[in-house]
Image: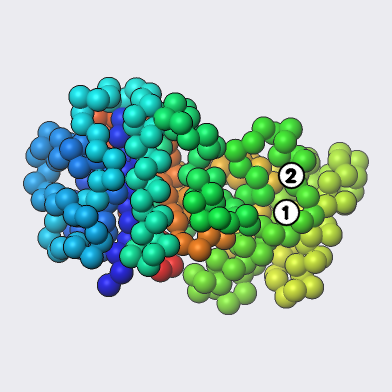
């Protein structure tokens, strides 16, 4: 059975904790997964909280054994090298190295999917890696130009036209070409998940979806042409719909997926509805990638309060898609 990779993310955050808790809560993942992270940090928390897990360092996914947490450590970090809950260049560098190694294994066919624990963008930059986040790193490592962020939960699924850019820049990125590209990516991933004909709605960029040009022209000049083009290809897509109602319709089952124009437009409704069980996916990659939909939570790191639910959801979806 091909393994699933779990990357530890930032060692100073809650990544190590939620990984160990997930392995403890659902032991079947010990056999199915390989953790890419700092073995010393994982051992420290395993002993601190008396979790009773057996950690085993390996050099290759082929060496993974049942009954233990298998760890590949491409960038060793010790607890003495950073302060829990604080920004660290070394931890930012490590978060990148763990992801890099996991993606290399995925591209080589050693793992079938990559599930990521959170990294900190500021620490990532301090470590010398000038990316906006996981999504952009994954695109660079795999050489992909056409990709998008999709938030997945039982209550609502949202795919984004743009993510980690300013709101002013997001308006410029809502082009006919990009909107059509994102509609196609969303349609493709839902069909892979088992939906024969996904129902997709496109949210407007402007209030009331522009009100026929009264509050903005982007719907008329960019969004509607993109929707028409995708409909002609056989995709069941509608819109643009008013942003203040379309997510409610999605949560009630009218649509299987909503296309959001920018980061907060999509993140706010999903996190409001299903914060603990939300999963972040990068679609359009040659490898399956899912992630927790929360950050490093420096304020509670090392306290034992972190919730592993989102990681378990990410693992379940990754296995399902793989």
Q: Which mark is residue 178?
A: 1
Q: Position of residue 168 (x, y in %)?
A: 74, 33
Q: How far is disc 1 from disc 2 in space, using C-alphas?
A: 7 Å
- What secondary structure is marked by label 1? helix
Q: Quadrant of the C terminus?
A: bottom left
Q: Which residue is mark 2?
A: 173
Question: Few, some or many C-alpha atoms within 10 Å of disc 2 (few <14, some 14-19, many ≥20)?
Answer: some
Q: Decide which of 119, 232 is in the foreground and name it.
A: 119
* The image quarter in which residue 181 lies: bottom right
| Label 2 secondary element | helix
Residue 112 locus on image (x, y percent): 37, 65
Q: What kind of colouring is applied to the model shown?
A: rainbow
The location of residue 157, given as percent across then percent down, is: 55, 56
Is residue 191 at all visible to an observer of this figure? yes
Q: Nearer the viewer, residue 278 or 246?
A: 278
Q: Which badge, 1 or 2, comes first in the chain's sequence?
A: 2
Q: Look at the image and tell me whether residue 258 can be seen.
A: no
Q: Position of residue 276 (x, y in %)?
A: 40, 45
282 in relation to 133, above or below: below
Pointers 1 and 2 in contact (CB under 8 A)?
Answer: yes
Residue 86 vertical position relative to residue 57 in the rendered view, above or below: above
Tag shown at residue 303 = none
Residue that appears at 10% across and 37% down: 47
Total label count?
2
Q: Is 100 above or below relative to 232?
A: above
Q: Describe residue 32's horizontal placement relative to residue 273 as left or right.
A: left
Q: Residue at x 51, y 56 (%)?
A: 142
């Amino acid at each position: 059975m091909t393994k699933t990779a779990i990357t530890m993310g930032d060692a100073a955050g809650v990544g190590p904790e939620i990984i160990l808790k997930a392995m403890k809560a659902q032991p079947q993942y010990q056999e199915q997964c390989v953790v890419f992270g700092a073995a010393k940090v994982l051992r420290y928390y395993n002993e601190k909280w008396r979790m009773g897990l057996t950690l085993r360092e390996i050099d290759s996914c082929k060496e993974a054994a049942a009954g233990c947490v298998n760890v590949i450590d491409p960038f060793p970090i010790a607890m003495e090298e950073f302060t829990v809950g604080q920004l660290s260049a070394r931890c930012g560098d490590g978060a990148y190295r763990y992801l890099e190694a996991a993606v290399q294994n995925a591209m080589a066919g050693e793992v079938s999917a990559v599930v990521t624990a959170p990294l900190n963008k500021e620490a990532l930059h301090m470590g010398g890696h000038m990316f906006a986040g996981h999504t952009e790193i994954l695109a660079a490592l795999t050489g992909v130009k056409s990709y998008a962020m999709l938030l997945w939960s039982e209550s609502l699924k949202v795919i984004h036209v743009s993510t980690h850019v300013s709101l002013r820049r997001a308006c410029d990125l809502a082009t006919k070409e990009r909107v059509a590209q994102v509609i196609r990516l969303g349609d493709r991933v839902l069909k892979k998940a088992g939906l024969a004909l996904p129902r997709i709605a496109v949210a407007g960029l402007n209030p009331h979806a522009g009100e026929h040009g009264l509050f903005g022209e982007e719907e008329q000049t960019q969004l509607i042409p993109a929707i028409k083009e995708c409909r002609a290809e056989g995709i069941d897509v509608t819109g643009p719909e008013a942003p203040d109602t379309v997510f409610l319709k999605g949560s009630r089952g009218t649509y299987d997926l909503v296309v959001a124009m920018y980061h907060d437009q999509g993140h706010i409704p999903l996190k409001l509805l299903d914060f603990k069980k939300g999963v972040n996916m990068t679609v359009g990659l040659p490898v399956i990638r899912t992630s927790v939909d929360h950050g490093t939570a420096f304020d509670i790191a090392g306290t034992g309060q972190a919730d592993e639910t989102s990681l378990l959801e990410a693992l379940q979806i990754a296995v399902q898609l793989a």
